[in-house]
Image (cartoon, helix red, strand yellow):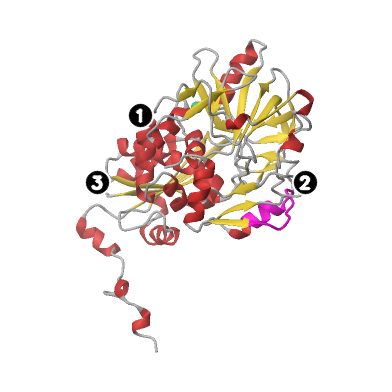
């Protein structure tokens, strides 16, 4: 397989999942509007963006089948492959010289005017400005030298300046240690990569694991890197754009509001500040934007989280079959767990494991193996017919939640467990049997309708 953005776009075209737009579109709202209207089944290449020579692509892997296809897999195999990649990362290969197309064009100093170079979009009504939403930030732990890669939202602040939201995860951990020494942290932002690189960047793994090596694990071959021009970092050689710069110590700037994955705005606050010293890009580069809260955005978070959760919940309840972080819960807050229940109490243990796996999880529903956890009508049916609140629901108040949840108290929030499973006793279970019309699955209406 060709694990480059251009290779993936060719594959999308072959699958009939790539739409192109030749008419002129504005990067302010219009690209996001067309993306929303088109829905999750297509990627879109906007070839004529007002004010720019650079095309904008969105929706690279906007559905589970598309994400699975990018790994050369079926939907059901995706989580296991992700866990394999976590367990056996593949070291990267740094190209000494030769293939360096990403440096076809180099901007330094005054020439680094990000708004002129990048067709960054304004996505939502009350967003404070233009944002990079698909830029992957690569940095190195100054103590261990291990790379880290993550997506942060970056607001264009004019010229070579960017704002960023660093939630308390790995990039923030690394930066905090640099800042304690009053030192800037060198970073490289890459834009335009194959979905495996985007997916790897979202791994919910421990500090000290290089997400670029997880990309190698997903591909089954080393990711090829090239050294940056002005910072001591390496970036994927097939990137479309590379922005090299530094997060400044003891500098904060107003950032936001910004429409986020819960489909509400993250409020304005004083946040981290970057200076970009050098930008490089390929010949005729392609710019990638992710419209926030679309499935493209949500699934990138969901797949790695579901993979990690499946492992953890299986440790607690070995009969666990599937985990689904639902799109309406932002693929963060709502979790459906499917188990092949053998013993009373298993569902509640699965809920504990799910709640412990991530601070973001708020509400967990457990269903039996005759319920499809990806069919939310089926899940609601199980809640409506298999749950009595006084014994099957429980609340844990005041646990750590997520700061972007508008109903949480600055991240402090409640957890809810719903056991929608049937009794393990086979006799008692019969009362819950689903009605079924024999033969319905084999009916071809063309054989019946005149
Ligand atoms: Mn990390």
Left or right placement of residue 102 versus residue 377 in this view: right
Q: Position of residue 251 (x, y in %)?
A: 73, 21
Local crowd at mark 1 within 10 Å, few (<14), some, or many (≥20)? some
Question: Which of the labelled discs sits on residue 51, or is there none?
Answer: 2
Question: Which of the labelled discs sits on residue 343, or is there none?
Answer: 3
Local crowd at mark 3 within 10 Å, few (<14), some, or many (≥20)? few
Local crowd at mark 2 within 10 Å, few (<14), some, or many (≥20)? few
Q: Position of residue 438 (x, y in %)?
A: 26, 74
C-alpha gap between disc 3 and disc 1? 34 Å
Residue mark closest to the camera, 3 vs 1: 1
Some atom of ligand 1 lies within 8 Å of the CB belonging to the residue at label 1: no
In depth, the one of 365 and 319 nearer the eye is 319
Numbered range of the magenta stretch: 21-35
In depth, the one of 397 and 433 nearer the eye is 433
Left or right placement of residue 311 versus residue 126 in this view: left
C-alpha gap between disc 2 and disc 3? 63 Å
User: Is 315 above or below relative to 439?
Assistant: above
The answer to whether residue 370 of the structure is visible from this angle is: yes
Some atom of ligand 1 lies within 8 Å of the CB belonging to the residue at label 3: no
The first of marks 3 and 1 along the sequence is: 1
Identify the residue position indicated by label 1 in the image.
Answer: 88
The first of marks 1 and 2 along the sequence is: 2
Q: Residue at x 52, y 12 (%)?
A: 143
């Amino acid at each position: 397989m060709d694990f480059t953005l251009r290779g993936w776009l060719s594959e999308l075209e072959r699958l009939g999942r790539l739409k192109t737009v030749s008419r002129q579109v504005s990067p302010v709202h219009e690209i996001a509007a067309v993306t929303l209207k088109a829905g999750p089944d297509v990627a879109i290449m906007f070839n004529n963006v007002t004010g720019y020579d650079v095309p904008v692509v969105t929706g690279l892997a906007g559905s589970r089948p598309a994400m699975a296809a990018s790994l050369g897999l079926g939907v059901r195999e995706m989580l296991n492959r992700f866990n394999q990649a976590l367990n056996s990362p593949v070291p990267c290969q740094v190209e000494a010289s030769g293939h360096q197309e990403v440096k076809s064009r180099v901007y330094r100093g005054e020439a680094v005017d990000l708004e002129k170079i990048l067709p960054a979009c304004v996505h939502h009504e009350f967003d404070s400005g233009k944002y990079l939403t698909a830029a992957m930030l690569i940095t190195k732990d100054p103590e261990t030298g291990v790379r880290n890669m993550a997506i942060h939202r970056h607001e264009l602040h004019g010229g070579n300046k960017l704002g960023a939201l660093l939630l308390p995860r790995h990039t923030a951990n690394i930066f905090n240690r640099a800042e304690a020494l009053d030192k800037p942290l060198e970073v490289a932002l890459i834009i335009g990569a194959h979905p495996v690189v985007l997916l790897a960047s979202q791994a919910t793994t421990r500090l000290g694991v290089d997400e670029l090596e997880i990309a190698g694990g997903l591909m089954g071959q080393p990711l090829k890197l090239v050294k940056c021009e002005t910072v001591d970092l390496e970036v994927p050689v097939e990137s479309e754009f590379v922005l090299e710069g530094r997060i400044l110590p003891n500098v904060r700037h107003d950032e936001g509001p910004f429409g986020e994955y819960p489909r509400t705005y993250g409020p304005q606050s004083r946040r981290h500040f970057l200076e970009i010293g050098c930008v490089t890009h390929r010949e005729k580069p392609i710019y990638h934007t992710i419209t926030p809260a679309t499935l493209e955005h949500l699934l990138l978070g969901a797949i790695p989280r579901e993979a990690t959760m499946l492992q953890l919940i299986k440790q607690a309840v070995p009969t666990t079959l599937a985990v689904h972080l639902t799109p309406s819960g932002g693929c963060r807050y709502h979790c459906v767990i499917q188990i092949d229940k053998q013993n009373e109490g298993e569902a509640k243990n699965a809920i504990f494991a799910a709640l412990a796996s991530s601070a973001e999880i708020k509400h967990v529903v457990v269903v039996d193996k005759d319920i499809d956890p990806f069919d939310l009508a089926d899940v609601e049916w199980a809640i409506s017919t298999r749950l009595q609140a006084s014994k099957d629901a429980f609340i844990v108040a005041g646990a750590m939640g997520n700061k972007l949840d508008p109903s949480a108290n600055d991240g402090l929030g409640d957890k809810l467990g719903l056991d929608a499973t049937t009794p393990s006793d086979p006799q008692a279970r019969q009362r819950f049997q689903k009605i079924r019309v024999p033969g319905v699955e084999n009916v071809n209406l063309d054989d019946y309708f005149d």
